[in-house]
Image: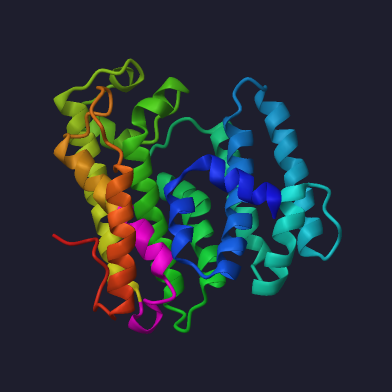
Amino acid sequence: MNQSHAITRKSASNLALAFILLPPEKREAMSALYAFCREVDDVADEEQRPADERRAILAQWRQEVQIACSNGTPTLTVLQELQPVIQHYQLPPELLEEILRGVEMDLDIQRYETYADLEKYCYRVASAVGLLSIEIFGYRNPACREYAVALGKALQFTNILRDVWVDAARGRIYLPLEELRRQGCPETDILEGRYTPQYAAAAAAMAERARRFYQEARRLLPPEDRRSMVAAELMGSVYWCLLRRLERAQFDVFSPRLTRVPRCYKLGLILRTWARIALGSAAPNYGLP
């Protein structure tokens, strides 16, 4: 899995950091899954290419996924490395398709009218990844699937709040337009990087929805599956910390304020999460009042 490892190491993402808590075999599998997600997402974000060209490249990825899932021989190295993972863990092909549909939405959609519209996007690019991940982690209680869906939406909402200015530079606004109108925040304020009380109110309203997803995930995680979900729990802890930092900064992502979780703090979260799971702690340490 040389290419998958290289992609994972290069990303330095929170998801890749969570792999450290997994046994070697599952770490390898998650590295292959992550590399697939990273590669197709990068295609959608490669804005120097025309949208039609990116769409054609994603269509090639879709064909390669179908080949990998039907025991053929894919030509893309990342899918060659993912194929044994698909087979061993019986990953549902329809979830890989959902991820592709999600990144394709970034080619065609730059605004979301409602929270329901945004949640559909978040399910595809985040919850579907979570549903695939728990197949690799292993679980006993089917309720774990609902946990993965809720946690995926919580993480993606937090990601969106962190990256508002980055996305605006690409002409994208993920905060629902209905919320912007409700708070009296014009799109131009976001696109031009103006921090206003109206924007802060819209971001706070979205953060409250993110909190509810964290709380839902906390409630849905079956006690018997807490140990196997240790990597997911670390992700929840890191992003919950990020959401709290955004709240303390009053969602001002347009200024040089730091809104990322320091790496030293993440390492502390790794140790605390591992210890909490190992000692059989009663509940996740995110989604608290």
Residue at (27, 23) in percent of width and height: 254
Question: Residue 264, percent across and down?
Answer: 30, 47
Quadrant for residue 47, please give it.
Answer: top right
Question: Would you say residue 174 sits in the magenta stretch?
Answer: no
Question: Residue 132, percent across and down?
Answer: 56, 64
Residue at (43, 21) in percent of width and height: 169
Question: Residue 224, percent across and down?
Answer: 38, 84
Could you tell me if residue 116 is visible in this image?
no
Residue at (52, 33) in percent of width and height: 109
Q: How is the image coloured?
A: rainbow
- Quadrant containing the N terminus is bottom right
Quadrant for residue 289, please give it.
Answer: bottom left
Count of marks, rendered view: 0
Task: Depth check: give the residue in front, 270 or 45.
Answer: 270
Left or right: 46, with 241 as reference point: right
Quadrant for residue 39, please give it.
Answer: top right
Left or right: 90, with 123 as reference point: right
Task: Depth check: give the residue in front, 221 or 18.
Answer: 18
Task: Depth check: give the residue in front, 215 or 264.
Answer: 264
Considering the whole magenta stretch, tell me its main secondary structure: helix
Question: Residue 95, percent across and down?
Answer: 60, 60
Left or right: 57, with 151 as reference point: right
Could you tell me if residue 120 is visible in this image?
yes
Residue 141 versus residue 84 in the image, above or below: below
Residue at (44, 83) in percent of width and height: 141
Question: Which residues, given as a range, are shown in magenta?
Answer: 222-238
Question: Would you say residue 228 sits in the magenta stretch?
Answer: yes
Residue 267 versus residue 26 in the image, above or below: above
